[in-house]
Image: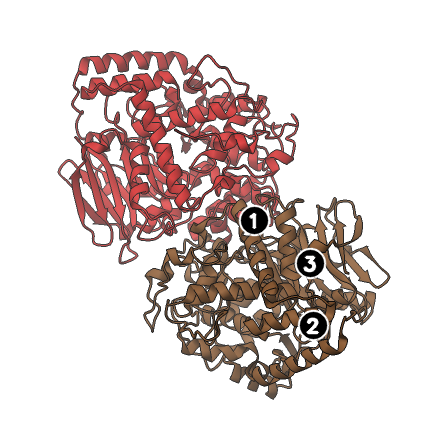
Chain colours: A brown, B red
């Protein structure tokens, strides 16, 4: 049995309550979305006292299994105006779970503009003054936190962008080396944390191993699964997520210069293969775990030519959105941008999309890396033009009168052009989260519930089924703490049931697990509907269906009526 | 029988067609909304080839009656994403109507980025090259147009903001003295004109008096009505629309410093009474007509202390939104801002609201007139921060993390705080146009269809009925060419029928006229619904119902379920 901790930031009151049996299967995204759905007025302003920030661990979190320690953040999104869940790796999910905390719920609005830290340890939870931390980037914040609370402290936090309540603000979590490089990036949840006056949450210790109904069984299931992951995920281990650069470029689906081309002339410079070479040559780390126990180890550490730390968790989507999509092919420039985004606490994806739209509108030339760096650095000072970029892609589109604005529900599309990856386009269009590659990641090779059906991502055929199935299974992964690199597939659904049964002595079936995903999507859609979303919002921007993408000449040709059949239940 | 002229800006083809009988009663807003509803895909990008810009005269336009020569502009709005009609005075409505033109419809997208002029005369319609006009403000443009086409040419045009396709861009129309001071300000229709590559529409001559079925009858009705207007509208004639400054301040409903107060400490400095005194002392013109034949003459001409021209059509909403709402009490500063907005071609209302939200976010201090002037001047150069302001109030709210953002459907509320003027709040919330005072102007003293019912604007009681009735009658006024200062009341509805009968030999009743308004609102709501609007969008921002407005302490307390009963037909 785990606890939920409610923190009223208006009164400073902290209340710990046990969860009733109706929450037995609600954790991670299933939990955050349930609370947003039940407790947040759908038409409230996302920065108002009425919004809540929910932090939830997964039911498998804190165990010895690999890839189960992601932590979910949820709220009404300042970027989309709809329901939002964004999750990240790092150590916080693991630690919170081991402290027996299912969720934190921040409520209300602070009475002063001072920032505070929530400090969580085995011996209690309190709010500490954080006035001296105002304006700090996440990296400096982490070192101050360690100075104050000791080197064993881990944290999640906001940077200056979250303090400024910018709608692209992220929440950073420390990784196993204490770097704030794991980010719940999407949807501006850092702004909600900023509006609650919370600069960071510090977790003082690691708690203890959870109890298992059948520890031996759990361990054997987890070990066997771990071995399989090591065998099957070699590309991720070797080249990180950037192993996708060549793959997606080959499919003709890499966003280049604000979605005007599907292949990038500098693809080799930003490829996972080149990334690994550069990292190794400079004494970096091409493969490391971001969270305890992960055997895939797709994270990395990138140094500059002098061998000094630049950034870590340097990922495919970041490299493509801040790189190719801005016409930038220089890894050093992109790595610097990644560091800045992590330190400021803004979403690298939305930032890349926003800068590219600004470039199209004449703010900078495509390929102007120095200009992009200066623009992002301006956020530290609150420069208006930089704040505008951090206002998101749609905001920049308006200020620059641009028609090619790749957003759905106010959130930018990601590193997969939907004209060449059509299932991804279906996910962008129909996910309650707004355009989001993680919501239903239909990359080449993925299948849905029926694994015997193979899909051609470049064809519209069957892509709504693929996206529908993946969105359900992703909602399960997001709810149990899984990193979806384990595969949003029926095996993971079945394994989840087995692991939970071994841990808790339950009799869950694969179908029970799948139902978690379905129910979560249902209430998310319900919230959005009450917030004012209709099927008109489940559409890609027109240009994807009207402008053929060079060089393939493809358009997004999934029919609107088919989009409306996605995520329909009962 | 009048013509509709379709201009395909992709091909340059201009086609003139007669209208069928189904258009007999469709003019002005009824016409623009019908075409948007029937021909524009509701989810298209407002700057795309699929959107259309429609310019329509009123059925009473071009006649000898007072106050009937407004011209309507319609499109899908770049600001709200919904249907939009915005109309203005000046001479263009009168002239187009006298040339037998019911409407112009601009369609498609230009193949180059060159701007053109549409030139309309008795002997034909053509597109002229306007490359040399790029970047010109409306004032300089008008003088170039007169150089090229002679002093009898009148025009409507866009300034640099429309060229940049900014979502607050307006369309300027010349007044009877040839000044581009009459503006169809709201909803960014200037950006749609810019996206069509049209810098201006030049009307070379005044055409001829329309034919009357019973000229004598028409003249006697018009003359009698004109006399009544002279008697009843003395406040407008003497002090212009700024006569409302004291009235609305007294009600406690003047937006001050971004809607944080309802009375302004510098109210006397910006009052209509002081405005008149300053104008007279400096040799300006306190009262003049903006369109041919107007007997109310609420427009004006404002000089600086040296007696030089600063601006004209210096109106209540402009003075309040760029003045009190920004904490600025200096008429000279506000007049300069008004001139800049007119010359740049941006909406003074949205600009004032956007600057005030920026001030709340720390961009400038409240009351910093110099800062505001510099900010607006930056639009000429395309300065990013200035473009952001011209991106609209909601955009600024996002970039500055502000919670108090007074917009409905993306468009800013106006110079009447809905906590003290509750019927106005109902109109803001429920109008298909987004927040708009003209959509249902429930100021003190107004009644609805039943003129015997008197309303207290500060009480929620009956305000949905008042707004409902006014919105219908305003839709009629907007459709027939009426300036609504004639009164959105049953008398005007009856008079409209009588005037049209005298002109055309029809047998219209007051009910037929009212049906024009009802039908127009119906199709507008239908379009918005297909564009993705729901009742969740028919709401004021939360802060109006949660934050009591000093000094009255009022909140907006019209119930959501009552809002949903407004504009329900059948």
Query: Which mark is drawn over residue A311?
Result: none
Q: Evaluate whether residue B79 shows in this view.
A: yes
Check disc 2 and report the residue beneath it.
Answer: A175
Q: Tell which tag, 1 or 3, sits nearer the viewer.
A: 1
For label 1, the crowd category at 10 Å Cα-Cα, with few meaning under 14, some 14 to 19 and many 20 or more, is many
Which quadrant of the structure image shows residue B297? top left
Camera-nearest residue between B510 and A68: A68
SS category of the residue bearing label 2:
loop
Residue B299 position (above or below residue A90):
above
SS category of the residue bearing label 3:
strand
Question: Disc 2 vs disc 1: Cβ atoms closer than 8 Å?
Answer: no
Chain under numbered label 1: A
Residue A222 position (above or below residue B93):
below
Chain under numbered label 3: A
**Quadrant of image for the C terminus of chain B:** top left
Of label 1 and label 3, which has the lower sequence position? 3
Residue B103 horizontal/vertical position (percent): 24, 37
Chain under numbered label 2: A
Of label 2 and label 3, which has the lower sequence position? 3
Rounded to the nearest whole Å, what is the CA distance between mark 2 and mark 3?
A: 17 Å
Q: Which residue ends up furthest to the left in the rendered image?
A: B123
Check disc 3 and report the residue beneath it.
Answer: A55
Please report the residue visible at 52 percent of the width from the left and 47 percent of the height from the top.
A529
Residue B425 horizontal/vertical position (percent): 52, 30
Residue A200 position (above or below residue B515):
below
Query: Which mark is drawn over residue A527?
Result: 1
């Amino acid at each position: 049995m785990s606890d939920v901790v409610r923190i009223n930031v208006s009164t400073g009151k902290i209340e710990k309550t046990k969860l009733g049996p109706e929450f037995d299967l609600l954790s991670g995204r299933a939990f955050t979305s349930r609370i947003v759905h039940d407790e947040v007025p759908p038409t409230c302003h996302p920065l108002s006292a009425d919004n809540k920030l929910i932090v939830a661990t997964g039911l498998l979190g804190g165990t010895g299994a690999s890839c189960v320690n992601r932590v979910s953040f949820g709220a009404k999104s300042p970027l989309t105006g709809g329901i939002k869940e964004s999750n990240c790796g790092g150590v916080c999910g693991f630690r919170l779970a081991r402290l027996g905390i299912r969720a934190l719920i921040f409520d209300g609005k602070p009475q002063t503009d001072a920032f505070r830290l929530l400090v969580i340890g085995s011996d209690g939870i309190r709010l500490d003054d954080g006035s001296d931390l105002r304006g700090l980037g996440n990296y400096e914040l982490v070192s101050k936190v360690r100075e104050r609370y000791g080197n064993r402290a881990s944290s999640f936090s906001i940077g200056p962008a979250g303090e400024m309540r910018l709608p692209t603000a992220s929440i950073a979590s420390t990784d196993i080396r204490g770097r704030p490089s794991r980010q719940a990036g999407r949807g501006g949840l850092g702004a909600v944390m900023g509006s609650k006056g919370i600069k960071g949450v510090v977790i003082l210790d690691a708690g203890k191993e959870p109890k298992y109904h059948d520890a031996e069984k759990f361990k054997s299931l987890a070990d066997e699964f771990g071995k399989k992951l090591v065998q099957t995920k070699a590309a991720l281990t070797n080249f990180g997520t950037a192993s996708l650069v060549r793959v997606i470029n080959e499919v003709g689906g890499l966003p280049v210069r604000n979605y005007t081309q599907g292949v990038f002339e500098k693809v080799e410079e930003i490829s996972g293969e080149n990334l690994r070479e550069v990292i190794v040559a400079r004494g970096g780390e091409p493969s490391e775990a971001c969270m305890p126990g992960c055997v895939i180890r797709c994270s990395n550490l990138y140094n500059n030519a002098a061998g000094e730390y630049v950034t870590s968790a340097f990922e495919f989507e970041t490299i493509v959105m801040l790189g190719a999509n801005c016409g930038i092919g220089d890894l050093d420039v992109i790595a610097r941008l990644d560091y800045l985004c992590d330190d400021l606490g803004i979403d690298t994806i939305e930032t890349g999309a926003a800068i590219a739209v600004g470039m199209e509108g004449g703010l900078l030339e495509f390929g102007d890396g120095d200009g992009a760096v200066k623009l992002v650095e301006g956020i530290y000072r609150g420069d208006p033009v930089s704040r505008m970029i951090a206002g998101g892609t749609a905001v920049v589109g308006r200020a620059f009168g641009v028609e090619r604005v790749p957003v759905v529900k106010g959130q930018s599309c990601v590193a997969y052009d939907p004209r060449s990856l059509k299932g991804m386009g279906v996910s962008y269009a129909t996910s309650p989260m707004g355009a989001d590659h993680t919501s239903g990641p239909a990359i080449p090779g993925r299948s849905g519930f029926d694994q015997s059906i193979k899909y051609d991502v470049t064809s519209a055929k069957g892509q709504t089924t693929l996206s529908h199935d993946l969105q359900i299974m992703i909602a399960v992964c997001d709810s149990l703490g899984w990193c979806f690199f384990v595969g949003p597939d029926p095996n993971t659904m079945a394994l989840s049931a087995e692991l939970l049964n071994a841990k808790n002595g339950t009799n869950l079936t694969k179908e029970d697990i799948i139902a978690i995903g379905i129910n979560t999507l249902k209430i998310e859609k319900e919230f959005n509907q009450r917030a004012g979303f209709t099927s008109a919002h489940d559409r890609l921007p027109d240009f994807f269906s009207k402008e053929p993408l060079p060089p393939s000449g493809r358009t997004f040709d999934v029919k609107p009526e088919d989009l409306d059949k996605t995520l329909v239940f009962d």
